Amino acid sequence: MRDDVQEFAALLRRLKERTDRSYGQLARRLAMNTSTLHRYCAGEAVPLDFAPVERFAALCAATPEERLELHRLWILAVAARQRARTQGAKPATGVPERAPVPAPVPAPEPRPASASASASA
């Protein structure tokens, strides 16, 4: 899991290092918080949407091949984070918790036709 996230973050850092811009300058151009961009590049967070990553790649003049690799690594990193969250949500026994299933409600019994209704018919 950490490897996928770290590979994604390493490519982000390599792209950033090619620019003469700081995290703050890039973050302003991307309309995001500087600390958020830094967490992405440090591998501490993974964006849930690829759009900011694509804008980051464009600002860093990534080649089409680098953009494709960035997208591939982003998909792996998001999947790794989701696996980590679901594994962290399980109880210590490793058995997933389940909500209790309510007992089925019996169907109402049909009412017999009244004797007066059947006599007048």
Image (cartoon, grey):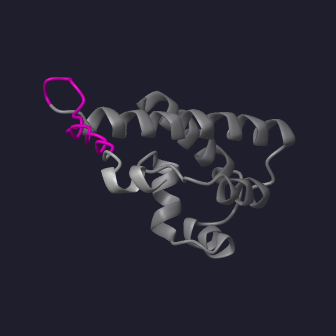
Q: Residue at x 54, y 53 (%)?
A: 47
Query: For this view, does 97 lie left or right of residue 37?
Result: left
Magenta residues span: 92-110
Which quadrant of the structure image shows residue 9?
top right
Query: For this view, does 59 lie left or right of residue 110?
Result: right
Say above or below: 120 vs 21: above
Q: Quadrant of the N terminus?
A: top left
Q: Residue at x 21, y 34 (%)?
A: 97
Residue 34 drawn at (x, y percent) = 51, 69
Residue 37 drawn at (x, y percent) = 53, 61
Say above or below: 21 vs 48: below
Q: Residue at x 49, y 37 (%)?
A: 5
Magenta segment: does it hold 62?
A: no
Residue 65 drawn at (x, y percent) = 82, 35
Q: Residue at x 86, y 41 (%)?
A: 64
Q: Among all residues in the image, which is located at the extreme right?
A: 64
Magenta segment: does it hold 101?
A: yes
